[in-house]
Image (spheres, coloured by chain):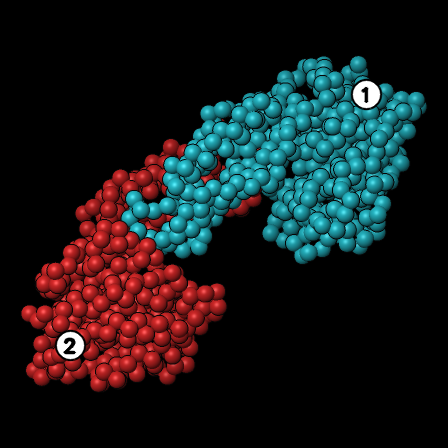
Chain colours: A red, B cyan
Amino acid sequence: MIDVQTLAIDPSELQARIDRLGNIGSHPDGGLYRALYDDGWVAGMALVRSWLDELGMATRVDAVGNLWGRIEGSAGGDAVVTGSHIDTVRQGGKYDGALGIHVGIAAVRALVAAHGTPKRPLEVLVICEEEGSRFSCNFWGARAIVGRIEPGEHERAVDADGVTIGEAMRARGFDPAHIPEARRDDVAAFVEAHIEQGAILEREGYPIGIVSTITGSRWLRVRVSGRQDHAGTTPMDLRRDPVAGAAHMIERVTAAATRMGRPAVATVGRIAANPGSVNVVPGWCEFTIDARHAEPEPRRALLAEIDAILADVARERGLELEAETMADHDPVPMHEEIRGILEEVVQGMGLRYLVMPSGAGHDSEILAPRFPTAMLFVPSRDGRSHTPAEYTPVEQIVPGVRALAGALHRLAY
Amino acid sequence: MIDVQTLAIDPSELQARIDRLGNIGSHPDGGLYRALYDDGWVAGMALVRSWLDELGMATRVDAVGNLWGRIEGSAGGDAVVTGSHIDTVRQGGKYDGALGIHVGIAAVRALVAAHGTPKRPLEVLVICEEEGSRFSCNFWGARAIVGRIEPGEHERAVDADGVTIGEAMRARGFDPAHIPEARRDDVAAFVEAHIEQGAILEREGYPIGIVSTITGSRWLRVRVSGRQDHAGTTPMDLRRDPVAGAAHMIERVTAAATRMGRPAVATVGRIAANPGSVNVVPGWCEFTIDARHAEPEPRRALLAEIDAILADVARERGLELEAETMADHDPVPMHEEIRGILEEVVQGMGLRYLVMPSGAGHDSEILAPRFPTAMLFVPSRDGRSHTPAEYTPVEQIVPGVRALAGALHRLAY
């Protein structure tokens, strides 16, 4: 095992890259917005390609727009790949996704400088889309790589202006008929570096997080229907008030997740009552529940408890309940062996690290079922994410570069 | 006291009038919409004026559009007035407001037929606007009568298209400069018949309700602010979740009103979370609370308890609380003596009646502080109100006509 502390990593160059990419694709209301196939995205991808070219990598863009930089290995075989995505949410920050590219480039650069040509092919992957912030789908790039884009999906997924993802592809010179060509089968390992997007590492003083599992989330759309009534003339005891019922449900659901403890979470992000007049008892109230847990068994228990709370409160209050599952993903465990390599490298660096589930989704959850995959986190200041306030000081990024470089060395050299 | 059971009241004529006015001013999505100064309102007012003309009343339209029909009294003096409004909410029904006109016309017609000219002037008043469903104000007609329209208000109150109430007046030939001329000082009594708009009379088997007090309502706009966070990466124990806090508040506020018992009510009619994404812990949640009670002391206690709940939950959960009072009206008691006359008349009819607060607002609450005022209710089928489903069978309206006629006879003959 190499001593990663001796690798030459230039923090100011790293910071300069973060800032330069972080100036491309700004949102009119502040922060970044690089959405798949838009101008900012094109400019960002071109900039990163120029960096991969400078590294001496052979670069190519696949059929959907993923960018690959490759150094051939002396022994050939399947590739060892690191990377993340450069698309952003609306009003996003400079670190979510992009950090994995910056860290990957710095790690490969340092490895090649110190150790020359790898045995296995070593690649940096810039995934074209993860966030789902333009089209009505997400993980577009990663799903193309594992062959999980459905036939005809490019005609169904649309943006807010009704443009299909297929039309947007053609406008950038991609032919949707070639989507299947983006599939890769020759990947030996994928390692993704990312900001934590939460505050646990920072609060608990860990410089590195190593991901055990990417959490499984279920999204419900819940509609509670009662009876629309006059807010002045209907006594409380004669009401079937869907907002009072929804409030009772939300209070109990969030309390249940809190009681279950980390990493159980339950979030009501959206809520509305109809007709929405101050002086009318609403006829119905609709809200969403995003519930997550990283382990299959407690996840099932959490979801079952939520379902029971919704049914109980509806029955107690004489309300009708409709719950539609918008999404339901099992947790995705990271690859034991690569995770172990990351742990050894970080131990070798003499750093504390936290083995933790990822509460957020990542490209790695799409790639993991097909390729040995692992992730490492660096802290997010104040846990901020999906906001221009995202920040990780460069001195907290450098240990991530060393950890990634150590793992890539073990896998590719 | 006359025997009101002998008065000639034609239920089929009453029903025909209800249906005829109920066909004027339809809303494209169903039900009625007669909004102040619009075409349906003009047509409805013209129809009612023709009915008042047929009754032999002298009719006039005042400076804001209230329609008055008058029979001079043999002894002169201040007028005894009955009436209500003919404007409706969007997708309203045929009974709210209009019923008071139909009942008033039928009562005056029966009284004149049986007893001839009154001693005091007897008037039917068709108030031009009560509901506040077009312009950003309400009680326009009643406030004009008591001189409570503020100088310049006609330039400030606008509809959804930005048309001021003054512009809308001019388009119908009314000059805002003349608004003060609508004021009346020569009213001896006002009695308004109305549908209950609730289900208490029907459920408890009372044919008539006599209003004790018009409830005092307070409208709050509450904003609970926490911290916007990622729904996957922020553990429950690190959150300041404004939706969970709002749910807790709403659950406790509605429970408090229920525990206090009739006629305390608390309604959350509108609620929203920002930014409103399924997978984002919202930064803030906004909702309204309409709280009402008919008696000043328990009303103060209810409002104080609501304020305490909001403050307690915000403090417990580390949330910021802003509560803006949108409206705050004290309860308005009805006139003891006229209320007593109504009770005697209904007792004389051998009917059970319920002395009850009005949970809804009415023109009578504007007129009551200046003129001796009282109200009677007939049942609303299934308590429906502000919907095309509003309904009261004509055989349940006729006792209301007789009760009103008896009271008008006592007051004017």
Q: List x then y, in percent, for residue B119.
A: 89, 22
Report the front residue among A368 and A241: A368
B384 vs A199, left or right, is: right
Q: Which residue is mark 1?
A: B411
Residue at numbered disc 2: A111
Subunit that carries the residue with mark 2: A
Residue at 45 percent across and 48 percent down: it is B284
Marks 2/1 in contact by CB < 8 Å: the verdict is: no
State which chain disc 1 sits on: B
Q: Is residue A7 left or right of residue A28?
A: left
Residue in the image at 60% along x and 23% along y: B295
State the image coordinates of residue A173 (x, y, percent, origin top left): 37, 84
Both marks 2 and 1 on one chain: no
Task: From the viewer's side, name the closer residue of A4 and B178.
Answer: A4
Q: Residue at x 46, y 28 (%)?
A: B256
The quarter of the picture where residue B48 lies is top right
Please tell me the numbered disc located at residue A173.
Answer: none
